[in-house]
Amino acid sequence: MPGPATPLFDAERPWRVALAERPGLVVAWTLLAIGAIVMMTPLAYMIGTSFKAPHEVYEINLIPHEPTFENYIFIFEKTRFGLWFVNSVVTSALVTISVLFFDALIGYTLAKFEFRGREFVFIAILSTLMIPTEMLIVPWYVMAKNFGWLNSYWGIMFPGLMTGFGVFLMRQFFMGVPDDYIHAARIDGLSEFKIWWKVALPLVTPALSALGIFTFLGNWTAFLWPLIVTNDRALYTLPVGLASFSGENLTDWELVMAGATIATLPTLVVFIVFQRYIIRGVVLAGLKG
C-alpha cells in the first residue's frame, strides 16, 4: 500500500527544499501571483487616484503624495451620488428578495409536484436563457410605457423580479431534497407552503446564498436597462449616474475615480464577506447541473 502523502511543508525541511521538490507548484503559484498583480493594479490605481489632488492625477504612482478626501466630499456635497447610491441599494435589494422568494417557490413546485405539463413548463423557462437581453429591451420598454412604469423604481426592477437561471438552479437543488422529509411533514399536518418554508428551504441554503449574491451583484452593476427606462436624474442608479457624471467631468479624473471607487467598493465587500458562499454555491451548482 502507498505510504502517507508527503506534506507540502515540514518543520524539519526548509521551505526552499520543499518547493524545489515540486517545481510545478512553484510555476502555478508564480502564475497566480502574476495574474493577481495584473488584476489588482487597475483597482489599486483607481483607489489611489481618488485620493489625489488635481495636480497629481497624471503622476504614475499608486500612493498619492498628498492624500485628500476633498474628492469624496465634493462627490457627496455637489452631486447626487448619495441618492444614486440609495437607488441602487433599494432596487438591487428588492430584486434579490423577489428572486429568492419566487424562484425558490417555482423551483420547488417543479421539483416536488407531479402535474400535467410540468416538463413543458420547465423547458419553456429554460428557453428564456437562450434569448439575449438586447432582444428583450424593446418589449420591456413598450410594456413599461403602456403600464406607466417609466421613470419609476418598478420600471427598473420588473424585468429581473424572476429569472430562468434562478428557477433552474433551485429546481436542481430541490430535486436532491429527500421526498421522505416532504411526506413526513405532510403527515404532521403542515401546509404545502410551510413544508417549503420550514422543511425544504433550509436544506438548500448554499444555493440560496449563491443565487442571492449573484442577483444582487448583477443588479448593482446593471447599466443598459436602467439607462433606457429612466431619464430623471433623481432615479438614476449608481452605474448610470457614474456614466453621466463621467461625461460631464471628462478632465476631472480624480472625481471620476472617486465615483468609480464608491460604485466598486460595495461589490468588493459583498464578495469578501460572502466568498465562501459564492465558492460553495458555484461548486454545488456544477455538481447539480
Image (cartoon, helix red, strand yellow):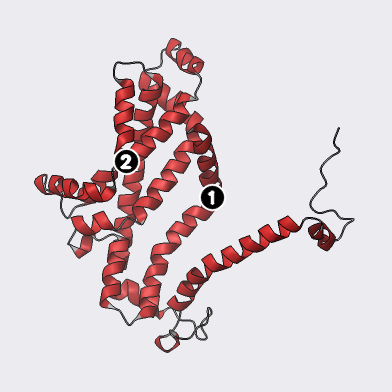
Neighbours of disc 2 within 10 Å: few (<14), some (14-19), many (20+): few
In the displayed structure, would residue 41 be above or below residue 32? below
Nearest the viewer among 2 and 209 is 2
Residue 167 x %, y %: 37, 34
| Residue beneath disc 1 | 275
Give the residue at x 82% y 63%: 16
Which kind of residue does numbered mark 2 sit on? Met
Q: Quick check: 37 left or right of 48? A: right
**SS for tag 2?**
helix
The N terminus - image quarter: top right
Nearest the viewer among 222 and 157 is 222
The answer to whether residue 80 shows anywhere in this view is no
Q: Which mark is residue 130?
A: 2
Most distant residue in the left direction: 146
The answer to whether residue 1 shows anywhere in this view is yes
Q: Would you identify the image quadrant in which residue 245 lies?
A: bottom left
Residue 178 x %, y %: 51, 20
